[in-house]
Image (cartoon, rainbow, N blue to C red):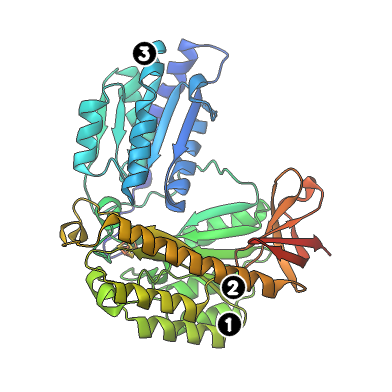
Amino acid sequence: MANTRVISPEELERQQPFMQQVRRFYEERRPDVSPLACVRTYGCQQNVSDSEHMKGQLAQMGFGFTENPEEADFILFNTCAVREHAEDRVFGNVGALKALKRRRPEVLIAVCGCMVQQEHIAKKFYQSYPFVGLLFGTHVQHRLPELLVKSLVERRRVVEIPSCDGVIAEGIPTHRDGTFKAFLPIMYGCNNFCTYCIVPHVRGRERSRDPECILAEARELVRQGYKEITLLGQNVNSYGKGEAHGVNFPELLRRLNAIPGEFLIRFMTSHPKDATPELFDTIAQCEKVSRHFHLPFQSGSNRVLKEMNRGYTREQYLELIRYARKTVPGIAFTSDVIVGFPGEQREDFEQTLSLIREVGFVSLFTFIFSPREGTPAAKMPDPISAEEKTAWFREMTALQETLSAERLQALVGTEQKALLESDAGEYLEARLPENSIVRVQGDPARIGESVTVRITSARSFILTGEII
Ligand code: SF4
């Protein structure tokens, strides 16, 4: 495999005695009472999946889980570095535990993930948050048992943040939060270096898991009754690039689709420069692959796209959408957009608005540009004021709300497949394959079931329906 460093089974095996040591440590501290871990996860689905792996390891070490830090023995923050606002929230939430640590000095507080992988942030935690006993980066999560031993048993303040191109650790136990929806990482890292993005700097180079490992995990999820499997990667469309196994993303989808059972395959995130006609041809042939496609366009202006280093033009993006709609009837798109990229002018922004009108997205994830230290965009001249960016942002969200409302209205009277996802008290929430939520009446015991729903009304962005 080209650049992939798969952690050897021997290296993973090395964690076993550390697991025993942690287990013994807590048994001696409080016999007959399981220690509790409170794991707080910020950011993307990849982080959620990482936390599920770390929770899997913690469960093997005898931990139970709690949402309440007051009753936890171990508090872990798995952080996100994509936007400044999210980082500020983490600093605030970690800072709020200072008093707890003073009252209960035996509690171990740890911070890991993308934020910590940045040197200036790790330094800030180390210097200004002395009650944080363990700091570790994205490339050593599989060594959590060893790091816990150093912190708890050896009573050291531990900082373990190696910088490397990234690793793949197979066979880490998983403690999944959901019972019918599962995340399945297929690759890690990114090679694209979009000029605004911190991800390649904190998650390393792109590397793909072996297809056989992915298929085995998917088969097991189906056997356990999972109804929806979301394949994860920073850029799933480039799955397999540079790897010796020769399986690309469409081929992986075909193999997953061939697994017997009733389940839906979703995936994220896609990159327009790597989404090929072959991919849409494959979706058209694979009945288990969702007809919802999240395809971030980021800007409708070619000038801004170039500054962002996105590797495609507005015209290429729109051509891709046209091809997809022709090939996969009913396919629905969602997207990410950044407003106020450095140097963006009103005419660039209007190009973004016109692209939104032309495509007709189901929904948009909209962001005001947030400079990330260490990325090229953070150093670009940015003359547009924060007020103006906010006004553009509002204009864009208002446009999308109007378009979404029209779309939802068009669904009234149709019958749709939906997955019953949650109990909201007065009604159940079901998700349509295109990603919209519909409210229905039903027995909460049916959550996790796939049903057919007739859409009866669409009001103020809320769909209501009845199970047929
Ligand atoms: S494709 Fe671009 S935006 Fe996405 S993770 Fe990679 S660098 Fe970041």
460 to the left or right of 89:
right
- Label 1 vs label 3, nearer the camera: 3
Which amino acid type corresponds to the residue marked 3 in the rendered image? Arg
Identity of the residue drawn at 38% across and 49% down: 169
Quarter of the rendering containing residue 51: top left
Task: Work out whether mark 3 precedes mark 2 in sequence or the reverse, and give the earlier one.
Answer: 3
Total numbered circles = 3
Determine contact: label 1, label 2, CB under 8 Å. yes
Task: Work out whether mark 1 precedes mark 2 in sequence or the reverse, and give the earlier one.
Answer: 2
Query: Would you place residue 367 above or below residue 37 in this image?
Result: below
Determine contact: label 3, label 2, CB under 8 Å. no
Distance Cα–Cα, label 1 vs label 2:
8 Å
Residue 193 locus on image (x, y percent): 25, 64
Which amino acid type corresponds to the residue marked 1 in the rendered image? Val
Residue 248 locus on image (x, y percent): 42, 73
The residue identified by callout 3 is 102
Q: Which mark is residue 133?
A: none
283 to the left or right of 13:
right
Dividing the image into 4 quarters, which one contains the C terminus? bottom right
Under tag 3, what secondary structure?
Answer: helix
The residue identified by callout 1 is 328
The residue identified by callout 2 is 291
The 10 Å Cα crowd at callout 1, few under 14, some 14 to 19, many 20 or more, is some
Dividing the image into 4 quarters, which one contains the N terminus? bottom left
The 10 Å Cα crowd at callout 2, few under 14, some 14 to 19, many 20 or more, is many
Identity of the residue drawn at 36% across and 37% down: 90
Determine contact: label 1, label 3, CB under 8 Å. no
Task: Work out whether mark 1 precedes mark 3 in sequence or the reverse, and give the earlier one.
Answer: 3
The 10 Å Cα crowd at callout 3, few under 14, some 14 to 19, many 20 or more, is few
Distance Cα–Cα, label 1 vs label 3:
58 Å
Under tag 1, what secondary structure?
Answer: loop
Q: Nearer the viewer, residue 440 or 154?
A: 440
